[in-house]
Image (tube, helix red, strand yellow):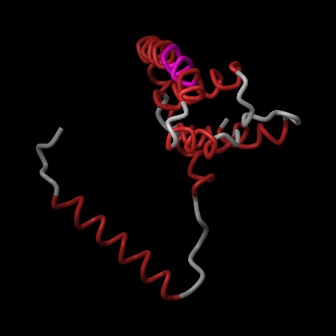
Amino acid sequence: MILFVSNLPSIITGLSFEQESLLSLIFQGLLLGAGLVIPGVSASFLLMAFGSYQYLLSALAQLHLAVLVPVGIGILPALILTSRFMNWLLHRVEGYTLYGILGLILGSIYQVFPGLPNSFGEIVLCFGLLAAGLWISLRLPKNYT
């Protein structure tokens, strides 16, 4: 699903979200809202996949309300509907839902994986960071829930 979404803008030709049409801005808000609720799906990833991340980021930096208000109008119903749908799924088919979330997370690893180390120094750095992360995680309090 993640691979499909990342290739969707190239599949649908002529789809441009950089236009300031009201429908396009509300749809971007719907993407943001769904990406904020669904585990394993990043809202920024969805916006980058559809080519509107930089556009919305610059609108936010400039406080361009003509862009931000329609996006906000799209976020609110997406947050409510997606969270209710996820709650419904977790109560009805918890196992399948958790497997689906795991699949989304594993699929998104492919999109963010930078590649294998190219030199011995990078390999040493990778293992050093792994060891540091393990050391820090083992030092965290055990009763933290």
Query: How many discs appear?
Result: 0
Question: Which quadrant holds residue 115?
Answer: bottom right
Q: Nearer the viewer, residue 94 or 42?
A: 42
Image quarter where the N terminus lies is top right
Residue range of the region highlighted in magenta in the rendering: 71-78
- Vertical order, 133 against 123 (above or below): above
Q: Compare residues 121 and 11 and report the one nearer the observer.
A: 11
Residue 39 or 27: which is nearer the viewer? Answer: 27
Task: Please indicate whether residue 91 sits to the left or right of residue 2 in the image.
Answer: left
Looking at the rendered image, the quarter that the C terminus falls into is top left
Residue 133, percent across and down?
30, 65
| Above or below, 29 relative to 49 | above
Residue positioned 23% across, 67% down in the render: 135
Give the farthest residue toward the bottom: 120
Q: Position of residue 60 (x, y in %)?
A: 51, 39
Q: Is residue 115 left or right of residue 80?
A: right
Q: Is residue 17 left or right of residue 64?
A: right
Q: Main secondary structure of the magenta part?
A: helix
Q: Quadrant of residue 49?
A: top right
The residue shown at (65%, 25%) is 25
Q: Is residue 77 magenta?
A: yes
Q: Position of residue 44 (x, y in %)?
A: 55, 42
Is residue 88 positioned above or below 142 on the image?
Answer: above
Is 40 drawn above or below residue 71 in the view shown?
below
- At 41% from the left and 13% from the top, the residue drawn is 91
